[in-house]
Amino acid sequence: MSSPLKQRPQPIRRFVDHKRQVGKATVHGTFGELLQGYRQHRTGDFEHFLFTLPVQELCTTATVTLSHGDGEHHVRPANRTRALAAATDLARALGLHEIDMDLTVDSNIPVGKGCASSTADIMASISALVAAASPGTSRRVLHALGTLVARDIEWGDYVLGESISLCLQRTHTLVRSYDTDLRWHILGVDEEGSVDTAEFHRRERESARLARHYASLLSELDAALMMNDFAAAAQVATESAVLNQRILPKRSFPLMRQVAAATGALGIAVAHTGTVVGLIFSGHQSDMPARLREAQLCLDREELNSRVYTVRDKGAAQLSSGDGG
């Protein structure tokens, strides 16, 4: 059976009728994950899941220029090979065979830190290509195109989402996106080094006991996000971070727990396959700015460079526009 992407190239192709068409798209990175784990089905198979944690400050912007030619594809910088591969696969599937494509990727997301740099590159590039070839494509169709292409390149974490989402990343399935008002801010620390996500997952060994625990945490977090319980959600994030210490420990984690207790942080978030760890605060805490400053001073005294990240959700958007209280 042919791929759904290859069945109807004409509706896309007809839009490329000018000398040059340009599309641009921005996709945000993440501060690791809110929760990452797996559950076990009655068949014995393990199903891996994660809750995304998108942040405003990290993003990739891709620009695609299409022009009639010999079907040559180029990317800048040259090392963004996965983004180019995804855009090339989609261009071929859409029937853009005699169209030259120039892809430019501009990103401030650190590589190998667990902040979805590669996935953001891929999804931004796919989105920019669709914007250039077929303006007005619905977000649902864009998401479907992106996941169908990206699944052959890497496991996605659905960075196209505007807020926290629950995903089955190994089957590229979006389970639910949450309309939250958490107003979270994360005071994050980036430890040295990098993590090869693909290699990490190849080494991972599942446990039936842990699967039950992760399944319980999934239910707790789903309920907390549905009820907009910003404190309970942060507690689940902390438990997920604690479990991850057995798998990929963060050197600064014990210190971060001490600072969290001293400053009234709601919890701790980490990149489960990366190197970042951060303290969770919320704008719902009336004295949040003072707590953030105190925590930053504590980290400064330990010679740890920190940065504040804004979790993307409805509450953060209202505060940035001056509508929130």
Image (cartoon, rainbow, N blue to C red):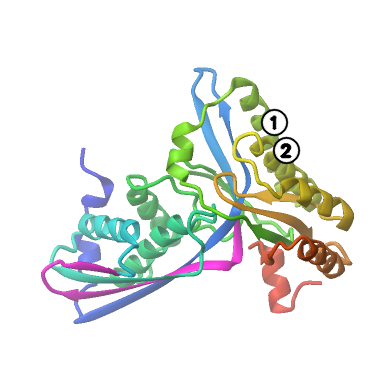
User: Does residue 229 appear in this view?
Assistant: no
Quarter holding the C terminus is bottom right
The magenta stretch spans which residues? 53-75
Of residues 7 and 193, which is closer to you in this image? 193
Residue furthest to the left: 70
Query: Magenta stretch mostly in which secondary structure?
Result: strand
Q: What residue is pinned by disc 2? A: 220
Residue at 71% x, 39% y: name it.
242
Q: Are marks 1 and 2 in contact (CB under 8 Å)?
A: yes
Query: Within the image, what quadrant is residue 3 found in?
Result: top left
Tell me: 163 left or right of 4: right
**Which image quadrant for residue 128?**
bottom left
Quadrant housing the N terminus: top left
What kind of residue is marked 2? Glu
Disc assigned to residue 179: none
What SS does tag 1 mark?
Answer: helix
**Residue 150 locus on image (x, y percent):** 36, 50
Give the residue number, with chain letter if any, for mark 1. 216
Nearest the eye: 53 or 271: 271
Locate residue 302: give its quadrant: bottom right
* Residue 10 counted in the magenta span: no
In this view, the residue farthest toward the top is 43
